[in-house]
Amino acid sequence: MRLRIIATGGTFDKHYDPLSGTLVFRDSVLPTALAHARLADPPAFEPLMAIDSLDMQDSHRQQVLQACERSPEQQIVIVHGTDTMRETAAVLGHAQLQKTIVLTGAMVPCRIADSDALFNLGFACAAAGLAAAGVWVAMNGRLFPWDDVKKNRDAGLFESAR
Amino acid sequence: MRLRIIATGGTFDKHYDPLSGTLVFRDSVLPTALAHARLADPPAFEPLMAIDSLDMQDSHRQQVLQACERSPEQQIVIVHGTDTMRETAAVLGHAQLQKTIVLTGAMVPCRIADSDALFNLGFACAAAGLAAAGVWVAMNGRLFPWDDVKKNRDAGLFESAR
Amino acid sequence: MRLRIIATGGTFDKHYDPLSGTLVFRDSVLPTALAHARLADPPAFEPLMAIDSLDMQDSHRQQVLQACERSPEQQIVIVHGTDTMRETAAVLGHAQLQKTIVLTGAMVPCRIADSDALFNLGFACAAAGLAAAGVWVAMNGRLFPWDDVKKNRDAGLFESAR
Amino acid sequence: MRLRIIATGGTFDKHYDPLSGTLVFRDSVLPTALAHARLADPPAFEPLMAIDSLDMQDSHRQQVLQACERSPEQQIVIVHGTDTMRETAAVLGHAQLQKTIVLTGAMVPCRIADSDALFNLGFACAAAGLAAAGVWVAMNGRLFPWDDVKKNRDAGLFESAR
């Protein structure tokens, strides 16, 4: 087992709650998504937290960092909300772990028609196996270094920060 | 535009025909799948043919090779049936083009619940951008060199040929 | 053409907006849903409004009533938000039109996995053809007279008001 | 509990088998479909058989008849393949049980995008509660008496036999 997938919440993992009419967190969709992916080497799956990335505090990012530090797998995919993906990537990037860490997420929840979640998950898993050690953001079919990425909220796209 | 996606048919792209009760080809699902992927750089899309890979003849593989040769993009993803993906990969591999060519497909059609198609497409697109020039097969979350891959039909998994 | 379907919005018809991360209205999903239903007699479809039923004012309900009055079809299905379905049903019920009017909706949007929308739509269409003239609410596999129905918000179920 | 749902197989209930590349039967999709429908009164569910209706023999139809005879519920929905739905309906119709029996099915399997399965299931459940005692076929948004229905295979639609 060479790949670890860490769930932190975010749009990717949201469910619709029929009582409140809002999008909420429940059990992660990732075990089901990974079953569909028919992986030959099932990754280690770690549901670390289930929060909106706008609610992420420094302490949460430290938890994510610790999960990466203690991971016996050298390849790590982190499923994360898009709004502060860049901030978490920066915390991980500064730590300079000798692992390939790829953050991804989704603009549309996995359980909604037309979601980008499964594509992004596949993209991130490949990147975790092929990219150099370091911290990367995989969104919109692109792989960004952690220190050169920002979310363009008007366009709903990630782009270079320069 | 750096990526070209070539559709050749295969399980990935099958539709259910309610009159015959069988799976058939119609317009490729790839334009819709790629729209969901929300790519920042929309790839060139080339619907080259729409056939079962068991029906692929040498002439079809030559068509695929020619499409790769004339592609101005250096990164190419080929969506292909799984049964003879290895054979087409070998034809392309022997040609030693200086491009990164990734063949992928699906064990379950894109339009059926629980499909691996979108994951595989994302995986292949990342691999086309990150792997060395050469010919690769991306299935089951693994990237195989064209000369070291086979389909294990009993398990429904691709594996090393050695 | 004997059946008219009037869209007013509600959870049934909500789309996910990736920029705001909220559920919003766009083009109604009903033409697509009805195409899937493969109806031998395509119904008349009238997208009257697209609002949350909590935002429905008296003037909106009068618009719905007028749409029912002018409908040349005697069988009418109204797709409506669940929160004030009962109130609109009451306005229509007091008008005592000689038509069979069935209000339905969904607890989970049509475009989200596990939605009740298509089941409810089928249930309501059958009820519009089989129930007596009058105003009915079709939810949770039950058909309620307009003056004996309420939404139990804690359970997320419609039930008799008595 | 007033409604019984009897599964017999048919297109409605088919799964895609990735190893053979064909549509096959596994566990019925009906428990999941019914959970999505959010019924206030969960029906009795009876998975009687799982076969193509083209494979139905007289003995199978007798089994269906016996299931209807012993059903304590007066309202029965039978999920059935479309090709011989009419023949099974005739066996049940001649038996003149004092129950409302509605046969339905799907032109596209429930698990495939664009399926008519959930609409038809909702339509049939409403018809089972509202139509007179007798045997009916619910397809294409229409309710046919058992002795006036045929499948038009060229159009993929059920129609009056007269």
Image (cartoon, coloured by chain):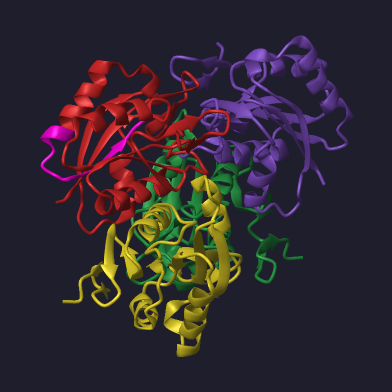
Chain colours: A red, B yellow, C purple, D green
Judged left or right of residue A83, residue A113 is: right
State the residue at coordinates (37%, 72%). B82
How far from the left and from the top, in percent, is residue C46?
79, 35
| Above/below status of C102 relative to D108 | above
Q: Quadrant of residue C133?
A: top right
State the residue at coordinates (28%, 63%). B143
Judged left or right of residue A144, residue C72 is: right
Is residue C13 visible from the viewing direction of this image? yes
Is residue A48 visible from the viewing direction of this image? no
| Above/below status of C104 relative to B11 | above
| Above/below status of D14 relative to C27 | below
Question: Residue C129 or A97: which is nearer the viewer?
Answer: A97
How far from the left and from the top, in percent, is residue D87?
56, 67
Q: Quadrant of the C terminus of chain D?
A: bottom right
Residue that extends furthest to the front in the rendered view of this protein = A162
How far from the left and from the top, in percent, is residue A153?
53, 28
| Above/below status of D53 relative to B43 | below
Q: Which residues are magenta?
A: A68-80
Question: Residue C79 or B98: which is nearer the viewer?
Answer: B98
State the residue at coordinates (47%, 80%). B65
